Image (tube, rainbow, N blue to C red):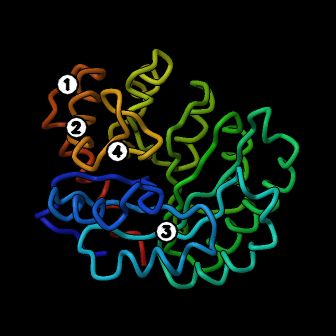
Amino acid sequence: MKTSDTIAGYDFHCHVDLQKNAPAYIAECETRRVFTLAVTTTPKAWPQNKKLMNGSRYVRPAIGLHPELAGDRYRELDLVKLCMKETSFVGEVGLDGSPEHMASFEVQRRVYGAILDEAQTLGGKVITTHSRRAATEVIDLIKARTTPDRVLNILHWFSGSKGELIAGIATGCMFSINPGMVRSKSGRELVGAIPIDRLLTETDSPFGIWEDRPARAEDVMGLVAAIAEIRGTGAARVADAVRENAQRVFGFAR
């Protein structure tokens, strides 16, 4: 994707197809001039997502298989790999170590590992990754299966420890900050510790909540102000950093 001076904000993780009115949400992204990475939870939704976003200036679909679904839908892995040839953006993928998903954890590992392997083989892939209660395992797989010159990994809604954050930084990961992170004490601590050249913004809408409602495209601007307040710096500096980081992402994608 070519960068544009017209982009007003950046949302690197959003479930556009799960909005109550997906076409209206896409139109809102266009009006607000918010670049939006529209993640896919199952590859069978990929054709419809591509169709929905065809012709959009600001919304781009990503191909994924959500770890919460991998236990039941692991047979769709080959379809994910096939669709990865059509786009630079991959997500939502990763691991979920929550108690309700531990039964499928080994299947999740095989699926995520195979997706990382395919991304490394193809090169020029940007991956937005889910790592809830599995940050160490995710980072270890990223380190073992990919190299930063071929795959750019974004850890979305990161909730790991400070040690896991340091490991993710060392592996070359970027981090997309959403409303949930700026509200919680642990999230705010992480937001303050992430290097400014690794920061991106996201809504994770409709799951991310902003002011007691599902986050919307324009909320990424408010998110920049919240990040600036946490870090004790000016909003303009954070906005500039997010813009520069986004340009790095766009420049990496093939």
Q: Secondary structure at mark 2?
A: helix
Q: Gap in Å between the C-alphas at discs 1 and 3?
A: 32 Å
**Image point (35%, 34%), residue name:** 213
Image location of residue 112, percent across then percent down: 72, 60
In the picture, the disc for residue 201 is 4
Amino acid at dot 3: Ala
Which comes sooner in the sequence, label 1 or label 3?
3
Label 3 or label 2, whichever lies nearer to me, is: 3
Q: Do the residues bearing badges 3 and 2 touch, measured as CB atoms within 8 Å?
A: no
In the picture, the disc for residue 129 is none
In the picture, the disc for residue 62 is 3
Toward which corner of the image does residue 161 lie, by quadrant? top right
**Image point (79%, 42%), residue name:** 101
Eyeballing the image, is 36 above or below 208? Answer: below
Asked if residue 149 lies left or right of residue 211, the reply is right
Which comes sooner in the sequence, label 4 or label 2?
4
Amino acid at dot 2: Val
Which comes sooner in the sequence, label 3 or label 4?
3
Amino acid at dot 1: Thr
Q: Secondary structure at mark 3?
A: loop
Task: Name the residue beneath numbered marker 2.
Answer: 238
Eyeballing the image, is 182 above or below 220? Answer: above
Q: Gap in Å between the C-alphas at discs 1 and 4?
A: 16 Å
Q: Gap in Å between the C-alphas at discs 4 and 2?
A: 10 Å
Which comes sooner in the sequence, label 1 or label 2?
1
Q: Gap in Å between the C-alphas at discs 1 and 2?
A: 8 Å
